[in-house]
Structures are given as structure tokens and as C-alpha cells.
Amino acid sequence: MPLSRSSGLRWRVIDVPRFSFSPGSTVNVMLAFEDTLRGGFYASLEKSDLGNSELNRPTGVNAHRLESLVRAWAVTGETRYWVPAARLIEFAERNVVDGPGGVVPDPVGDMQLIPEVNGLAIHAWLMWWTAGRDARYRSSAHKSLDRVGEECWVDSGGFIQHAAFAG
């Protein structure tokens, strides 16, 4: 119910300091998840996951993180975002990029193409190419699009993930 002036209550503005937020604050927190020794970003920092660090750096998570780093660099122009992005690209090329095109979902394990993961990676690769203008990454993205289209597209259902079923 709105207050009228006749109620005798007066509103006054109280100066409360606002929460300080910068566009890079989320990315700065994300940098704590980087594996600076082997490359890539961890999905979490739980102690149980760190014992199996090879299994804790999924391609989809790293694709999102690459996009965030490229955006942070584009906004700020600071190398503290560009350098981890370059290390992440090198990690991906060594561990998850498949030669004929496409990316695998994890550095260790199944080598099957998954359309969702490849879509994320292709988008991130194109953002990286746009920022750096290195034609290798555009070509890699196009090769990935072609391979995922050939292997995972079904006319009656769109993109599908082929799975090996245990019998």
C-alpha cells in the first residue's frame, strides 16, 4: 500500500555502498582453475577431482572458458586474459583436437564425436580466430563442422550422438 504524505512518515535516501563488480571479476576467479603445468582448466577444484586431474578438464568447460577469456581480452586489452587463452588453445590442440576434424569430449577417454561438445568448441575456435586472425583456427573450425556434419547428422532427426551400448 502506498504511503501518503499525511501518514507522517518521510523517506530518506541512505547511502549504502554498492557491491563492486567489474566485468572481469568472474574471469579472474576462473583463472584459479587453470592447470598451468599441463594446460586446460579444471571443471572444479574439489580434492577428490584433483587426484584424477586428467579426467577433470572436459572440452565443453574449456570451450566456455576460452570464450570468456577472449571476451575479457576484447574488453580490457590485457594480456593476463590473452596468455591463458593461448595456453588453452595449445592444450586443446595437443589433447582434444582430432586430426580429421572435430574434438573429443575429454583429454582422456572416449574418442567419439559429440555434436554438443563440438558445437561449443567450434564457436570458441571462431571467437579465437576473430580475435587473433590466425587462419589455422578458422580452418580447424570448418574442418570440424564438416566432420561432425558427415558423422553425426541424420536427416530424420538432426544431430545425434552415436553411442556404444554395453550388452
Image (spheres, rainbow, N blue to C red):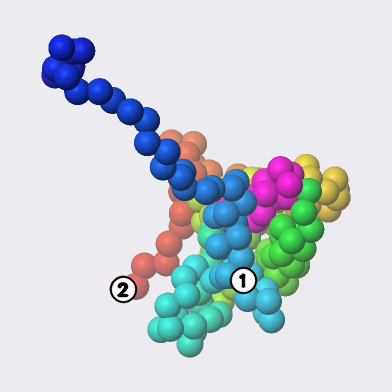
- Whichever of callouts 1 and 2 sits on the residue coming sooner in the sequence is 1
At 33% from the left and 28% from the top, the residue drawn is 12
Left or right: 153 as drawn, with respect to 31: left
Residue under label 2: 167
Q: Nearer the viewer, residue 133 or 148?
A: 133
* Mark number, residue 144: none
At 36% from the left and 67% from the top, the residue drawn is 165
| Region rendered in magenta | 64-76
Residue 65 is inside the magenta segment: yes
At 73% from the left and 47% from the top, the residue drawn is 76
Q: Secondary structure at mark 2?
A: loop
Q: Amino acid at mark 1?
A: Glu
Percent x, y of residue 64: 57, 54
Left or right: 78 as drawn, with respect to 119: right
* Mark number, residue 34: 1
Q: Is residue 3 visible?
A: yes
Percent x, y of residue 122: 65, 49
Percent x, y of residue 4: 18, 13
Q: Amino acid at mark 2?
A: Gly
33 is higher (above) or lower (below) than 125: below
Majority secondary structure of the magenta segment? helix
Q: Nearer the viewer, residue 109 or 61?
A: 61
Q: Secondary structure at mark 1?
A: loop
